[in-house]
Amino acid sequence: MINNPNHLLAIFLGIILLSVWLDTKYAWARKISPVLMIISLAGFVSNIGLITDSSPFYEELAGFTVPFAVCLILFTVNLKDLRRFGATLLAAFGVACVGTIIGVMTAGLLLNPELVKVLGAESWKLAGPFVGTYTGGSLNFFAMWEGLEIGNPDLFAAANAVDNLTIFPLFAVWILVPAWLGRFYPSSPFWGAVDGNAESADIEITKPELRILDVVALTFAAVTVMVLSDLIKTHLIAPVVPSFPTILIVTTLALILAQFRFMGRLQGAFELGNLAFFLFFCAVGAMINVKMAIVLSPILFAYVMIMATVHLVFIYGVGRLFRLDIRVLTIASCAAKSGPPTVVALANVHGWKNLVLPGVAMGLLGYAVGNYLGFAAAYAMKALLGQ
């Protein structure tokens, strides 16, 4: 089993190269997208035992590539677009959160007899982390697990594995549904083409001429933002709010820097950002442990699948009822589950450049409300179960 960081990086780059090559060569691959191919290939080589499914390298890689990629993608964002955002975005995110809570309640009530075998009289607590992760991402999942004092490291490992495992089917839905069902939803030209066609007038993306000066400048700017964010967190914010997420500082500084005209002239931010995100998704795929998730605690898999299904049916169903744009609904669902980094990647995959900043905003809102909603849902579940 391969666990040397250099060897793992070589395998990851090979997976990325193969996925990008397939995407440029075959129409069927373009419909799947490089992201899904990368996650599935990384998960495959991990689960057959070719590479390790647990390594500090994965955490270090994700810890660098996520803020780095977020910086690069946000360098292309113009805050003037904020004038055109409105209640639609907040409504879509609200629908996503409500769908999550209904999904968790449904799963908890249906499966409680089995959950009691795992958690005893504290089975209600499981609602907290999963509402947290489906309204604010993994950050809230970990916070809720600790905050509700669930403990049980074996269950935590299984729950985390299941949570990672659901990234694949969810990303598949977020990528495929807009193209399949877009014709049934109203469409606003501002958000770009539903099918992500880069030839649309609104989102036409010309291939940049990559210049070494621009590449170095963008890399320097992104790393500088990351360093400053760490310093600000350590010396100014952590003494007051130790759990404050650094990604919020990274996002703020990157957006401020992006408003300077000279940043808009630098070419290649999306390409560098995509490469960083591809490495991140390799790490995510490699950490998916299907065997542990299914063998150790299959009830968790059923729990999450019920919750995720209800969430998706609710957001797309209610969104259709209230005539919300399917792109906004998709980004809202992604923002609720995965937070800003994955939202930026998803918007970039589709070519929805005008939804990058709104998606980040919804993801940041999820960071803020996820813990509150998680605690509220957990105690509501406790009341419903009479525990």
Image (cartoon, helix red, strand yellow):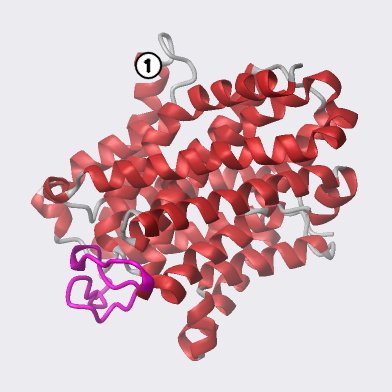
Residue at screen point 76% across, 48% down: 301
Where is the N terminus found, in terms of image quarters? Answer: bottom right
Magenta stretch: helix, strand or loop mostly? loop
Residue 317 shown left or right of residue 380 in the figure: left
Helix, strand or loop for disc 1 = helix
Q: Looking at the picture, does residue 202 appear above or below residue 174?
A: below
Residue 64 shown left or right of residue 299 in the figure: left
Residue 54 on image: x %, y %: 75, 47
Comparing 310 with 204, the one in front is: 310
Classify residue 114 by image quadrant: top right
Residue 36 on image: x %, y %: 57, 68
The residue wearing badge 1 is 237
- Would residue 138 be visible to someone looking at this image? no
Q: Looking at the picture, does residue 129 appear above or below residue 217?
A: above
- Would residue 8 be visible to someone looking at this image? yes
Q: Which amino acid type is marked by label 1?
A: Ile
Asked if residue 197 is among those painted magenta in the image, a careful observer would answer yes
Comparing 333 with 254, the one in front is: 333
Residue 134 on image: x %, y %: 54, 41
Where is the C terminus found, in terms of image quarters? Answer: top right
Q: Looking at the picture, does residue 129 appear above or below residue 88?
A: above
Magenta residue span: 184-210
Residue 384 on image: x %, y %: 68, 23
Comparing 254 with 338, the one in front is: 338
Residue 98 shown left or right of residue 233 in the figure: right
Residue lying furthest bottom:
26
Residue at screen point 63% across, 31% down: 129
Residue at screen point 56% across, 27% down: 374
Residue lying furthest top:
240
Residue 20 shown left or right of residue 357 in the figure: right
Asked if residue 365 is among those painted magenta in the image, a careful observer would answer no
**CA neighbours of label 1 inside 10 A, class few (<14), some (14 to 19), many (20+):** some
